[in-house]
Image: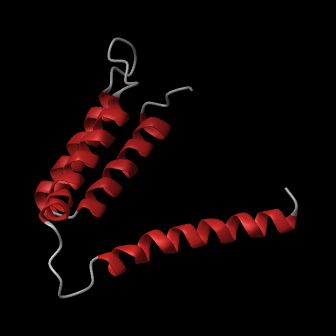
């Protein structure tokens, strides 16, 4: 890719991102009630996305060979424990990720 093509690509990505972010405010202006379906999606999608992430995270875990899924289980317990304790999704996911990375890189030293 040339420098010009890179700049055009970045500009298109920025424009697409801004369009999708701002269109919600144009479609649902402040003070106007959002449709019931949109409110339902706002309540249902976070849990659905988290469920999908959990399935994606554990789909390749091999429990019949070393380390038997132990790092994943410990990271899951840390994530759930932090979320129950602090009720902060960002902190919970961050703590679980840090613990998992430490476990697989320093404690269990899993070759890939």
Residue drawn at the location 23% of the way across and 55% of the way down: 46
**Pick the front one: 40 or 48:** 40
Residue projecting furthest to the bottom: 31
* x then y, percent, for residue 77: 20, 42
* x then y, percent, for residue 35: 16, 68
Horizontal side of 81 relative to 93 (left or right) equals left
Residue drawn at the location 40% of the way across and 17% of the way down: 66
Residue projecting furthest to the top: 64
Horizontal side of 90 relative to 14 (left or right) equals left
Horizontal side of 15 relative to 98 (left or right) equals right
**Pick the front one: 96 or 50:** 50
Residue projecting furthest to the right: 2
**Pick the front one: 54 or 13:** 13
* x then y, percent, for residue 86: 15, 64
Residue drawn at the location 26% of the way across and 33% of the way down: 73
Q: How is the image coloured?
A: secondary structure
Residue drawn at the location 43% of the way across and 30% of the way down: 108
Quadrant assignment, res 91: bottom left
Q: How many marks?
A: 0
Q: Is residue 33 above or below residue 36?
A: below
* x then y, percent, for residue 2: 88, 61
The quadrant the C terminus occupies is: top right
Quadrant assignment, res 72: top left
Q: Is residue 88 above or below residue 53?
A: below
The quadrant the N terminus occupies is: bottom right
Q: Is residue 90 above or below residue 58?
A: below
């Amino acid at each position: 890719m040339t420098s010009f093509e890179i700049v055009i690509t970045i500009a298109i990505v920025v424009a697409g991102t801004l369009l999708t972010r701002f269109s919600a405010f144009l479609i649902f202006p402040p003070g106007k009630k959002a449709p019931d379906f949109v409110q339902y999606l706002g309540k249902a999608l976070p849990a659905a996305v988290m469920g999908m992430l959990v399935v994606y995270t554990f789909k390749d875990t091999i429990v019949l060979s070393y380390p038997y899924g132990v790092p994943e289980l410990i990271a899951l317990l840390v994530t759930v424990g932090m979320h129950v304790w602090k009720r902060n999704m960002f902190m919970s996911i961050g703590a679980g990720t840090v613990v998992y990375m430490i476990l697989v890189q320093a404690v269990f030293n899993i070759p890939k």
